[in-house]
Amino acid sequence: MALNNIGDAGQIKRKVYQRRLPENPSKDYYYILRETGNTEPILVEYGFIDSPRDAQKLKTNLNNYVEGVVKAIAEYTGYKYYPPGTSGGTGSIPNSYTVKKGDTLYKIANQFGITVAELKRLNNLATDTLQIGQILILSENNSGPSNGTTTYVVEKNDTLYSIANKFGTTVDEIKRLNNLTGNTLYIGQELTIPKGNNDTEYDIYVVKKGDSLWLIANNYGVSVDELVKINNLSNLTLQIGDKLKVPMVGSNNNNKTYIVKSGDTLWSIARENGLTVNELKELNNLNSNLLTLGQELIIKK
């Protein structure tokens, strides 16, 4: 527990172990732990004295590391932890917080007296990445589903689109409700889902030269199996001019698109349209830098 809290504060986590006295395995190897009487001692190594890198990290972050241990002890002994400078719980925690420049999950959690793990659970966060302007839920009072929503636990092979389709809603709405900045899900993740009418509508996509089921599915954020199921395909071979049902992407009917030509790269297309490569890949749900001639890319929403 102490190691996890120090890790949340920015320390590299190595390992936890107990070294036993060779001549008497019932006792600890370290005298400082062995001779402490009827207590539950723990020895924390914050770094190595001969490491310039560790020395600099300790100089900068030692207070945070130590506070991580204090928080761990409070949690282990069943006491509520209050960060330095707070009034010991006399004030109430707000329901939500808007991420500002320089914020980290640890900094926010520390500010409001909760753990990073709890903050990630409340907001269904799979990573520690935050975006400026992102709204985070800080308490259970604001995290439960309302009358217009339900909770869904992600299962194997689920995608945002398949879940949206199942509940008659949109990918964008699920991402908004759960503060998701990407399309990645993990098994067991809890999502707040709006209750829809399950009358999902589709756009029609006309197959062009160079298209494949994988390419089309990837561009619309679905799996090949879902695309096959939507269109009741018995033959996986596509012909130019074939019409496929594809998921509607909110207001993307007005998206500005670009058709890939010979010699194009993600970098050249991104530069030409004032985007970064990562922004271009995110707009098109691309997992690699490979392009095909005739491929249609969204370059502006």
Image (cartoon, rainbow, N blue to C red):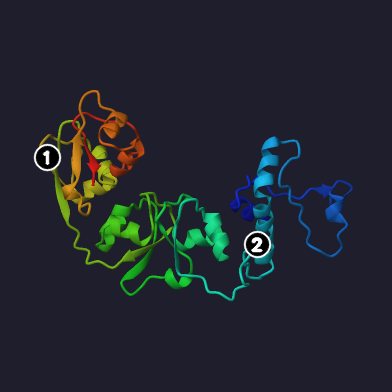
Which numbered disc covers residue 114? none
* Left or right: 125 as drawn, with respect to 261: right
Task: Give amino acid for label 1.
Answer: Asp
Q: What distance separates the C-alpha of mark 2 from that of mark 1?
A: 61 Å
Task: Give amino acid for label 2.
Answer: Lys
| Number of numbered markers | 2
* Left or right: 176 as drawn, with respect to 86: left
Query: Residue beneath label 1, please?
Result: 242
Compare residues 112 and 232 and report the one nearer the observer.
112
Residue drawn 29% across and 53% down?
161
Q: In which quadrant is the N terminus drawn?
A: bottom right
Residue 20 location (% of width, % of height)? 82, 49
Compare residues 102 and 266 and report the one nearer the observer.
102
Residue drawn 70% across and 36% down?
52
Whether residue 26 can be seen here: no
Crowding at dot 1, Cα within 10 Å, few <14 / some 14-19 / many 20+, comes out as few
Residue drawn 76% across and 39% down?
49
Residue 11 location (% of width, % of height)? 63, 47
Q: Secondary structure at mark 1?
A: loop
In the rendered view, tell whether residue 132 sits above or below residue 298.
Answer: below
Crowding at dot 2, Cα within 10 Å, few <14 / some 14-19 / many 20+, comes out as many
Q: Secondary structure at mark 2?
A: helix
Query: Residue beneath label 2, please?
Result: 71
